[in-house]
Amino acid sequence: MRNQTRQSAVCIVSGGLDSVCTAAYLARERNADLYVLTFAYGQRAEREIGRAAYFANVLKAKDHKTLDIGFMKSLYGTSNALTDTNQELSQNFAKSLVVPVRNAVFLVIASAWAFSINAKLVAYGAHSGDVVHYPDCRPEFAESIAKTLNLAESDGIASGWRQPIQVWSPAAAGMSKADLLKVGYSILGDRLFEAWSCYTNGVKAKVRAKSSKAATYLHCGVCESCINRKVAFTSAGIEDKTDYAIGRH
């Protein structure tokens, strides 16, 4: 049964499938007023930022902020392949795909917004498949950082000036990427294919892709994230209408 009591939720949305489906889930299943937060942190896949704005509009978010924290790219240096364009993107999971404490950085900023607007929930799109490789996607991390952030505002909470926050992700509910896609597709239909998963900024298409109004650039089809996208749609029993540069429909 859906929660009929409306609440405000700050949801971190990159523009990818997981975060988009999480936002859709919150809007429908948790009856939340969405406040969407997107980060430009120096990632290769800048194209995802525009997709986040698209879905914030589709889901009728109360507000959507895109924060430029591109200075993080200089701090990350050669630590990962998602911000360092000189590194090759792997087809399978590799440590080079881990951006150091990225979710922690995002959640601290998102929580500052949540405390400011008295939103009780801060959400991000980590799912059960992420917990194997990404420590900051694990439910115990989410619980720990929420405890720390509530301590940081403990006086305001004690006085009633602030509300304590909960940091939530689909992983906490045991939801897989396929589970998320089923929920997201039931809400968004074919618009879900507009979400950007590719770790690259796209491969320029020779012809317009059928599934996207914008489509001069396609998902590469071979990076780890594109492969995970294909597998998840198959696992969810949803026909993948994404256009890929390699293995395209």
Image: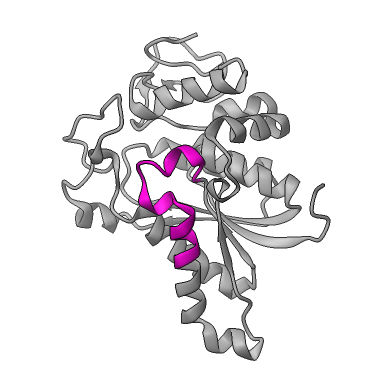
Residue 73 visible in image? yes
How many marks overall?
A: 0
Residue at the image point whose x is 72% and y is 55% from the top: 32
Q: Which of the pair 237/241 is nearer the observer?
A: 237
Residue at the image point whose x is 50% and y is 63% from the top: 143
Q: Which of the pair 224/133 is nearer the observer?
A: 133
Q: Quadrant of residue 94?
A: top left
The residue range painted magenta reads 126-144
Q: Quadrant of residue 81?
A: top left
Q: Horizontal placement of 60 versus 130: left or right?
A: right
Taken as a whole, is the magenta stretch helix, strand or loop?
Answer: helix
Residue 54 visible in image? no
Q: Does 31 appear above or below 92?
A: below
Q: Is residue 67 magenta?
A: no
Residue at the image point whose x is 60% and y is 36% from the top: 180
Residue 59, horizontal then vertical, whole percent:
68, 44
Residue at the image point whose x is 30% and y is 32% from the top: 93
Q: Is residue 127 magenta?
A: yes
Q: Which of the pair 101/62 is nearer the observer?
A: 101
Q: Does 119 appear above or below 58?
A: below
Q: Which of the pair 236/108 is nearer the observer?
A: 236
Residue 194, horizontal then vertical, whole percent:
56, 29
Residue 63, horizontal then vertical, whole percent:
63, 57
By what rule are the colours in the image chosen? one colour
Q: Does 74 appear above or below 146?
A: above
Residue 139, horizontal then vertical, whole percent:
49, 54
